[in-house]
Amino acid sequence: MSEETNALAAIEEHRAKIDEIDRELVALLNKRAGHSLVIRGLKPDARMGLYDARHEEEIFAKVNSYNEGPLYNEYLREIYVTILKVMKETPSA
């Protein structure tokens, strides 16, 4: 096999792994959204506001503590800012 053929095969193998990870990420994001929606529904009874900046900072700190790279913490924060924004905008079922 040529070097080019080997490289193309390796790329396809990695892309297949990424596809599987994407499937898992979608499932996990939907699971997270379900819990977020339940919490949103419970907050009024707990006399809590819908938005809690302090809790968001706690989430970012936890995510940073889980990070073993290669992503930098600031990139993970960007991802989580978007996740939290989308969770807030997701309509209740």
Image (spheres, rainbow, N blue to C red):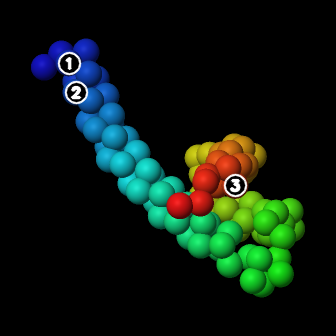
Which one is closest to the eye, mark 3 or mark 1?
A: 3
Q: Earlier in the sequence, mark 3 or mark 1?
A: 1
Marked residue nearer the N-terminal end (2 or 3) = 2
Q: CA distance from mark 2 to mark 3?
A: 41 Å
Mark 2–mark 1 contact, CB under 8 Å? yes
Q: Is residue 76 visible?
A: no
The secondary structure type at the circle numbered 2 is: helix
**Which amino acid is tagged 2?**
Ala
Q: Position of residue 75 (x, y in %)?
A: 69, 43
76 or 41, nearer to the observer: 41
The residue singled out by tag 1 in the image is: 5
From this view, report whether residue 90 is shown above or below residue 39. Answer: above
* Residue tagged 2: 9
Kindly identify the amino acid type of the residue bearing the numbered disc 3: Lys
Q: Residue at x 27, y 30 (%)?
A: 12
Vertical position of residue 87 compared to residue 7: above or below: below
Q: Position of residue 39 (x, y in %)?
A: 65, 73
Q: Amino acid at mark 1?
A: Thr
Please tell me the numbered disc located at residue 88.
3
Quarter of the figure with residue 47: bottom right
Q: Is residue 59 left or right of residue 92?
A: right
